[in-house]
Amino acid sequence: MPTSGLSTSRSASFFGAALVGLKLDAITSRLGGELRTIVACLKMMCTGYFVMGAAFEPLALGLGRQTAGGGVWLYSALSLALALFQFPLATTVTALSTSAVPPSLKGTLVGTEHAIFALASLIGPVCGVFVLERAGLAGCAAVASTSYGGLYVAWRLRVAEARARPPSPPEPSAASELLAARRSPRFIAKKK
């Protein structure tokens, strides 16, 4: 693929993310909430990268090299399709994680997430180039598809485990403990 096509594909990805970002609330509602949005996005990312791998693998479909421009437009179209699921996945995971912590820890959580993203930005290109040089675009797509497939399976197992566990009783708050203490026979005896 010519290097000029890489900038086109990146622009397509950012364009797709912008479109989805404007309608993320409606998309999440239509899919049935945050958890179902995450599951759908993981499934589609796995499938999308699988299709990309097959499209550029000569032993499979091998369409990538047969299209005009050496596959630039096919790669751009697939990148746009993947961006339509990658953006809501990342945004929804961040929204769920920040809603699970008290307000005093939200900054710490977001900072930790950004530190992990920065680390991935440092390591990812090195690993990606290594795989690209040895296995080509189809190999990179296969690794990405496998990664998202593993995340999908792990997420589904976690959800199934949470559903199988009996609900735990709510922990008493300080106010409910004080109320219970006031109703105890020792408290009533002291009052008289």
Image (tube, helix red, strand yellow):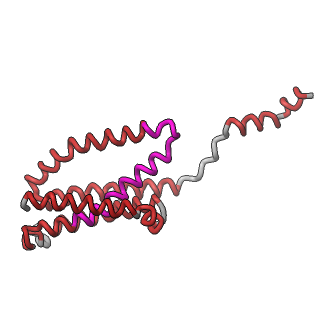
Find residue 17 and report its horizontal and vertical position in percent. Answer: 31, 60
Find residue 147 and report its horizontal and vertical position in percent. Answer: 27, 55
Find residue 177 and report its horizontal and vertical position in percent. Answer: 72, 36
Asked if residue 58 is among those painted magenta in the image, a careful observer would answer no
Query: Image quarter for residue 56?
Result: bottom left
Query: Which one is in front, 17 or 114?
Result: 17
Q: How many marks?
A: 0
Q: Name the residue at 31% across, 41% down.
A: 116
Looking at the rendering, the stretch of residues picked out in magenta corresponds to 78-107
Asked if residue 97 is among those painted magenta in the image, a careful observer would answer yes
- In the rendered image, the vertical position of residue 49 relative to residue 119, given as above or below: below
Query: Which one is in front, 57 or 64?
Result: 64
Query: Image quarter for residue 28?
Result: bottom left
Find residue 100 and report its horizontal and vertical position in percent. Answer: 50, 46
121 relative to 113 in the view: left or right: left
Give the quadrant of the C terminus.
Answer: top right
Question: Which residue is at the far top?
Answer: 190
